[in-house]
Amino acid sequence: MFRWRRAAWDAALFLIDFMTTDPDVAAISPHSGCVGRHGAEARNEKKSMLLARTLLAVVFALPVAVLAIRAVTQDLKELSDPCVAWGASDSGDFGDGFHHRGEAPCTQWSSHNETRTWAVTRMVAFPGLILLAAVLGICAVACSLRRMTFIAAILMLSEAAPLAIGLWGMLVALLAGGGFLYTGYRIWNEERHSAPTP
């Protein structure tokens, strides 16, 4: 237990140091002259920077990913519930009707005005796309793919609509999108400094 706490504390300190370090200084490449450092030390530092970026992306994406998974799980639960009616109108008519499964009686009925088709579309378009952007952003940061990181940031920020995912969801989506933009900028800055000068 102590080892895990120590590792978590070291990771937190490393992330703080990574976020507060000037990108123009941290992006110095061993090919452009790391004074007084050997090649192995420069490679270890590059691996440490990559690990810090990946952990930072996970920290930014985890809250919104949890909300998206929760929303998808809730939607799937209602879609598979035989006691839920879809497409209910104000007059009491049901467009999709009740979908019975088996002979077990329903102790409680519920209905939704939206149809099952629209419910599936909404699930894919909002929490599904948010979850995709979170996974894409983490993988892009871990692989140092600058363009994919920016794409994930744009997708995440485009989903930050309070009417779609709620106020709390909007805040964590903005946090994740901003975090992906920041890490994408760090990747771009490192690539710019490591590029050979003509």
Image (cartoon, rainbow, N blue to C red):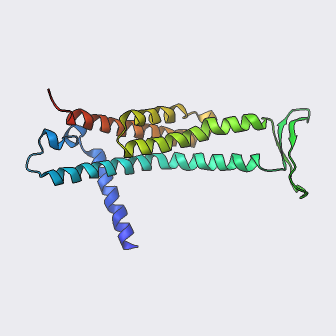
- Is 39 or 87 nearer to us in this picture? 39
**Would residue 66 be visible to someone looking at this image?**
yes
Residue 69 appears left or right of 136? right
The quarter of the picture where the N terminus appears is: bottom left
Residue 159's spot in the image, x, y percent?
55, 34
- Is 116 or 171 nearer to us in this picture? 116
Residue drawn at (37%, 62%), measured in percent from left and top?
8
The quarter of the picture where the C terminus appears is: top left
Residue 111's spot in the image, x, y percent?
83, 42
- Is 166 or 69 nearer to us in this picture? 69
Vertical comparison of 87 with 98: above or below? above
Residue drawn at (37%, 73%), measured in percent from left and top?
2
In the rendered image, the residue lying farthest to the left is 36
Residue 164 appears left or right of 27? right
Residue 151's spot in the image, x, y percent?
45, 32
**Would residue 166 be visible to someone looking at this image?**
no
